[in-house]
Amino acid sequence: MEKNVGGYDRIARAVLGPVLIIVGAATLAGFLTIAAGTLGLVVAVAALLVGAVLATTAITQKCPLNDLLGFNTYKGAKTTETESAGKPRAQ
């Protein structure tokens, strides 16, 4: 899979992901109350999972959902067939 996460998309994921991880972990540890009972547990686990996915996609710059929907915010150099075949690129 090619990189498809970059620019502001990557920055937003890199900021929001860890924040959601912290909120989810703090809620599960009892330091923060989002909602009472089972709903609070479900929201905390969801925040933890979504935060982990966002942080991972920010680091790897690859998002399967972006690929599925056809979004590409990565503006890096594209590889051509000759580059991927192991031939050096002229500069």
Image: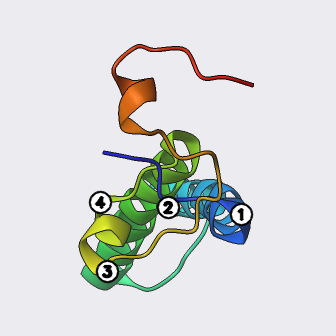
Chain-order first, disc 2 or disc 1: 1
The three-letter amino acid code for the residue at tag 1 is Gly
Dot 1 falls on a residue whose secondary structure is helix
Dot 4 falls on a residue whose secondary structure is helix
Q: Is residue 38 above or below residue 86?
A: below
Q: CA distance from mark 2 to mark 1?
A: 26 Å
Q: Is residue 71 above or below residue 48?
A: below
Which one is in front in this view, the residue at disc 2 or the one at disc 1? 1
Q: Badge 1 is on which residue?
A: 7
Q: Which residue is pictured at 68% across the width and 68% down the height?
A: 12
Mark 2 crowdedness (10 Å alpha carbons): few <14, some 14-19, many ≥20: many
Q: Badge 4 is on which residue?
A: 64
Q: Badge 2 is on which residue?
A: 24
The three-letter amino acid code for the residue at tag 4 is Pro
Is label 2 in contact with label 4 (beta carbons under 8 Å)? no
Instruction: Give residue 88's position: percent from left, percent from top.
Output: 55, 14
Chain-order first, disc 2 or disc 3: 2
Q: Which residue is pictured at 66% across the width and 61% down the height?
A: 19
Q: CA distance from mark 3 to mark 4?
A: 33 Å
Chain-order first, disc 1 or disc 4: 1
Query: From the image, which quarter does the N terminus lie in?
Result: top left
Q: CA distance from mark 2 to mark 3?
A: 15 Å
Q: Badge 3 is on which residue?
A: 37
Instruction: Give residue 76's position: percent from left, percent from top.
Output: 64, 49
Mark 3 crowdedness (10 Å alpha carbons): few <14, some 14-19, many ≥20: few
- Circle on res. 72: none
The three-letter amino acid code for the residue at tag 2 is Gly
Instruction: Give residue 55's position: percent from left, percent from top.
Output: 54, 51
Q: Is residue 16 above or below residue 2?
A: below
